[in-house]
Image (cartoon, helix red, strand yellow):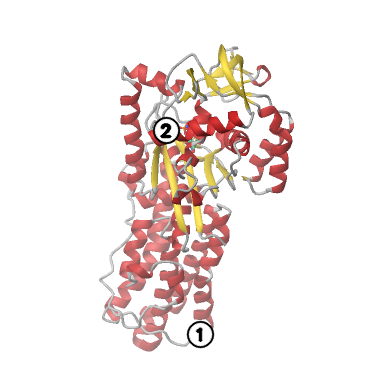
Amino acid sequence: MSKRFYITTPIFYVNGAPHIGHAYTAIAADVLARWKRLDGYEVFFLTGTDEHGQKVEKAAREAGVDPQAFTDTVSADFRDMAARMNVSNDDFIRTTEPRHYASCTELWRRLVANGHIYEGFYEGWYAVRDEAFYGEDELIIAPDGGRVAPSGAPVEWVREPSYFFRLSAWQDKLLAFYAANPDFIAPHARRNEVLSFVRGGLTDLSVSRTSFRWGVPVPGDPAHVMYVWLDALTNYITAAGFPDESAERWAFWPADVHIVGKEIVRFHAVYWPAFLMAAGLAPPRRVFAHGWWTAEGEKMSKSLGNVIEAREVAETFGLDALRYFLLREVPFGNDGDFSRRSLITRLNDELANDLGNLAQRTLAQVARNLGGCCPARTPATEEDAALLAAGAALPATLRERLDRQALHEALEDVWKVIRAANVYIDRQAPWALRRTDPPRMAAVLRVLVDVLRDVATVLQPFMPASMARLLDQLGVPTEARDLASLATPLTDGTALPPPQGIFPRYADPVA
Ligand code: ME8
């Protein structure tokens, strides 16, 4: 089994500032990347910015700035957002980098050499907002009676010379590929959408534009720039070292999973594997499409002024509370609504109460009654054994969940153990045992310390900073925080630092 893991986010358009939707994808991918590292994998985690195309060029023009300067600024803001979300990406790719031009140019050459590209003339509908071509039959009627893209984006009629990719020749090959790789597209509903789209027949895809300049020039025909989606998708191989197939990083290709929003599944699950196979390269192993967030029940939009900025939310509620909320509130794959109320409820009930209080109660008793030394392990009673077994089962359970990107299920599994530990502490009542049976009190506290260690270890990918603090308080050395280290028990008698609350309750000033 290869112990390498390559995971990506979409590269984000730099036509506007990052918001909670971008942060969501980056955080979800971060949890999966961190989990694999914790499980002993060599991980390559990529995010970045998509900087070419008409949409970005237009945004730069409206800002009165040259496109390169414009993209430099906005790309830096995305990079800052990722850092502030504690996203542990190993690389940050920008499509305006020379390495990416080299990669796109070589991919194009291979497509031409293999006979998949021909010159022609494009005449049809284009939506700049989606950077996508649409067939006449795909357009829908807008509320004002005009015709728009299925996404609601305005369309314009385009007539220009263009190179085409022979996508029509890929229908059977793609269907065979999906059949041979039933897990390629997830969740299941998205897979069905893609299958019916491909079964409906594919038309050749226009892959170059001549009406604007902001893109990667087509090799040998600089009047054309490459279609921004061909350029953008190629980022995933650029970062892996393409076209240098002897690069060390190339061992990471094919990517294990591309995490994307549901609106861009077609590009990742149809065009991308077709481009790669046509160039003689391996397609990615999986595309997982998550759902979309609304804000307090409304679609987020600049005109409504309700766009949620992840960095602001993290300032107010704490970054780990935000990370937890995003992944706990909504099954990964479904749409969800961002509401302050629900975030506060989850922060107070699940983080401050269920987990924070459990840790505080346990560690305060160790500090007060046992001189702050980790009590010794003792033979387990039936109830001890049941709770210890539940904690010890977490790594295997989460491994199964996270291999399916079922992030919400993973959190629910951990909370089952936390709730069981709360029931246990109440039933065992170590505070009462302090007088009646001090050795049993110590034994109970040790069981709780062990379970808290399991919980904190597996939760590190979700809430890295808070769980690092909890593991500090549990006396777990930094080099013993991976999954493999759970096999080695904590040393009896270890001096624990004085406990401190990890999740302050949020008292809502507006409530
Ligand atoms: O599509 N809810 O870039 P983009 C959840 N450059 N996720 C959201 C979201 C929301 N409301 N809004 C955005 C592009 N996202 C292309 C990608 S990849 C080769 C090129 C997230 O800036 C989600 O991941 O429009 C979505 O797919 C992505 O941002 C779109 O970002």
Q: Report whether residue 334 is seen.
A: yes
| Residue 481, position as x, y percentages in the image | 39, 67
Say which of marks 1 and 2 sits in front: 2
Note whether residue 296 is visible. no
- The residue closer to the viewer here, 205 or 304, is 205
Q: Secondary structure at mark 2?
A: loop
Residue 339 figure quarter = top left
Compared with 68, 354 (above or below) is below
Q: Nearer the viewer, residue 400 or 238?
A: 238
Asked if marks 1 and 2 touch (Cβ < 8 Å), the reply is no
Which residue type carries mark 1? Thr
At x 57%, y 62%, the residue is 1
Looking at the picture, does residue 182 appear above or below residue 78? below
Amino acid on which the number 2 mark rests in the picture: Thr
Decide if residue 474 is on the left or right side of residue 109.
Answer: left
**Which is nearer the eye, 346 or 218?**
218
